[in-house]
Amino acid sequence: MSQQIVLLPGDGVGPEVVREGRAVLEQVARTFGHSFAFSEHAIGGAGIDAHDDPLPKATLEACQKADAVLLGAVGGPKWDDPGRKVRPEQGLLGLRRGLGLYANLRPVRVHPALAASSPLKADKVEGVDVLFVRELTGGLYFGTPRLREALPPDGGARKAPGKIRAIDTLEYTDEEIRRVVRLAFRLAGPRRKRVTSVDKANVLESSRLWREIATEVGAEFPDVALEHQLVDSCAMRLITQARAFDVVVTENMFGDILTDEAAVLAGSLGLLPSASLGDGPRGLYEPIHGSAPDIAGKDIANPTGTILSTAMLLRHSLGFAREAAAVERAVDEVISSGARTADMANANGAALSTSDFGHRVRAAIR
C-alpha cells in the first residue's frame, strides 16, 4: 500500500525546491522498494490567487488524510500588504492548527566543510549540533483579544496619553507547555541528554508557568539534564557558545526568533530543514527559508533544506529511519565533495543549479 504524501509547493522558490524533494523521495522509493503516492495542492499566495483563500478547504482535507505533508514556502511582495485581511501566512498557521501540530523541530548542524561559510569564526561553529523544539499553537501569535482601537484624548487607562492602543495577549495552559516540553525530553534521550528550557521568567507570568512545568516534566526524565535559560542570555550564548546546547525548547515567539538567529550558524538559510509534529505520526515538513521571490524561477535556490526535510519526513512520519539516514548521508557526501549552490558557492564562484544539486544527491542515494 502506498504512503500518501501531499505536496504544497506554495510561492516563490517553493515549487522549485519541492520538485527536488519529491524527486529524492521517488529515488528513495526505487532504492528501498517503497511506494509513495503524491498529490499537489495550493496554499499561501497560490491559494489566494486560485481560490481567494490561503488554505483552501480541499488543501486542508487532503493534508488531514495524508501520511505526511511537504511544503515549499509561502508569501511574497504580491501579497505583502500588512493591512490585507487575507495573507499567505494565514494558510500556514491554519494548516498547523488544522493538523494539530504543536511542536516545530529545527535541527541546526554545521557541516564541517561549510564551517568557513558561517559569518562567525570557524572555531565558534565547528561541532554545533542543536535541535530546537518550538511550541507552535500558543503564545502571542494566537492570543486573544487582538485589539487595535482609538483612545480618548487623555489616553484612557494608559500611563501616557496616546491616540491608538494595540493589544496582543500571551497565553499558555499547563498542558500546552507540558506536551511540547515532554517531546523535547524524549528527543534528547538518544542525543546528548541535555535540555535547555528558554523563557523570560523574571518578567512574564506565562514564563513562570513554563519554568514550573518544565521542572515537573524534567523530573520524569532523570537521565536527561535540564537547565533554564532566559531568552536574552540564550540569544547571546547562541553566538558565543552554541556547542553548549543540545536540545532547546521554548515558546512560540521566542522559538521563532532564536531559530532564525541559529540558522546563521550554518552559513545559509537554504541548508536547514524543519518538521512540525503533533501527537500522531502525521507531520508537516519544510525548509526554514522563505519564498525568496527575487530568485524564483532561476533554478538557483538551495534545495538542501527541503531534501533534509524529506529525511525528517521519512523518519518521523513514515518510520523509515534507515532511508532517512541514507538521504542525510547523501547530502553530506555531496557537500563534502565540494558541490555548492549559489548561496554557499566556493571561492572560485563555482555553483550548481537547484536541479543539478538535487541530481547529485539522488545519485549518491543510488
Image: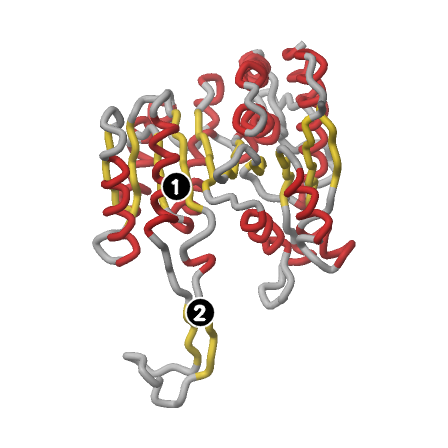
Q: Of the numbered discs in the image, which one, if any, rests on residue 145?
A: 2
Name the amino acid type tagged 1: Val
- Residue 69 is drawn in which quadrant? top right
Mark 1 neighbour density, 10 Å: few (under 14) some (14–19) many (20 or more) = many
- Residue plotted at (75% across, 36% down): 39
Q: Nearest the camera: 45 or 133?
A: 133
Q: Residue furthest bottom?
A: 153
- Residue plotted at (40% across, 45% down): 255
Look at the picture and state if 44 lies above or below 304.
Answer: below
- Residue 194 is drawn in which quadrant? top left
Q: Residue furthest top?
A: 366
Q: Which residue lies furthest to the right in this view?
A: 50
**What is the x, y in percent for residue 319?**
55, 22
Q: Nearest the camera: 74 or 206?
A: 206
Q: In this view, does 97 lie to the left or right of 177?
A: right
In the picture, the quarter occupied by the C terminus is top right
- Residue 198 is drawn in which quadrant? top left
Task: Decide if residue 124 is in sight here.
Answer: yes
**What is the x, y in percent for residue 242?**
33, 30
Q: Nearest the camera: 159 or 202?
A: 202
Residue under label 1: 180
State the SS at label 2: loop
State the SS at label 1: helix
- Residue plotted at (59% across, 48% down): 95
Q: Of the numbered discs in the image, which one, if any, rests on residue 321?
A: none
- Residue plotted at (46% across, 47% down): 136
In the picture, the quarter occupied by the N terminus is top right
